[in-house]
Image (cartoon, rainbow, N blue to C red):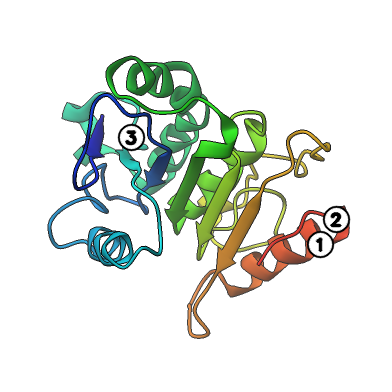
Amino acid sequence: LSAVLLPAGFDSAKTYPVMYVVHGFDADHNAHLNTGSYLTLLYGNMLHDGLTVPMILVGIDMYTDKLSEKENKSYEELRYIYDKVIDEIRVDLMPFIESNYPVSTDRKDTAVAGVSEGGAKSLCIGFKWLDEFGWIGSFAPDGNVIPTGPVRSYWNDPYMDSFPQPNENNTPYYLYLAVGTKDPWNINCTFLYRDTLNDMGVKNQ
């Protein structure tokens, strides 16, 4: 499932950058694109003030199993169901969006961003598909991307052994990491991601 937000003044004859937005744990594809979302408010204000460009925002749902069974899944089961979105976004969702909306397919116009478990998935997606995503935003990412030590039980199994090393052709144009100073879970793993990327020579803020 996905939710799509078109920019003000949308023109189907134009081609737009696209940002795929990943929700946090136990949320859904509407979490960041509904009318009460800070993302839509910030994006609308930035667009009005000329601080960003018109783009298409796609809220993606990490839940890749039968929706009728979602309420019966444990958090541990959800974690591994969510992992499947790392491939599904590229194999299924992106071709659908590119076929139905006027989005650019160039990595310089393609971003992924998310919060919490969605922040972890944004790093996984961005680094698994370095040739597809030029921009990565990870807000308070959970600790299941690379080995980060004990965090919480079902986050201890990392998705990657290490971040793939980008080359000169697929290094992210911009990689943003953020975490609150009072975040109860994800400060240490965010710093570990930062330090690991720095050691790899991958610039990040």
- Tally of numbered discs: 3
Disc 1 residue type (three-letter): Asn
> Quarter-wise, where is residue 59 in the image?
top left
Disc 2 residue type (three-letter): Gly
Q: Estimate the spatial distance between the alpha carbons at disc 3 and disc 1, rounded to whole Å.
A: 32 Å
- Left or right: where does residue 104 sit relative to residue 178? left
Identify the residue under disc 2: 201
Identify the residue under disc 1: 198
User: Quarter of the image containing the N terminus?
Assistant: top left
Q: Nearer the viewer, residue 110 or 119?
A: 110
Element assignment for label 1: helix
Q: Estimate the spatial distance between the alpha carbons at disc 2 and disc 1, rounded to whole Å.
A: 5 Å
The crowding category of the residue bearing disc 3, from other C-alpha atoms within 10 Å (few below 14, some 14 to 19, many at least 20), is many
Q: Where residue 186 appears, x then y in whole percent? A: 55, 69
Element assignment for label 2: loop
Q: Decide: is 115 above or below 64.
A: below
Q: Hey, which residue is sitting farthest bottom in the picture?
A: 182
Which of the two labelled residues, at mark 2 and mark 3, occupies the earlier sequence position?
Answer: 3
Q: Where residue 114 appears, x then y in whole percent? A: 44, 52
Identify the residue under disc 3: 63
> Quarter-wise, where is residue 134 in the image?
top right
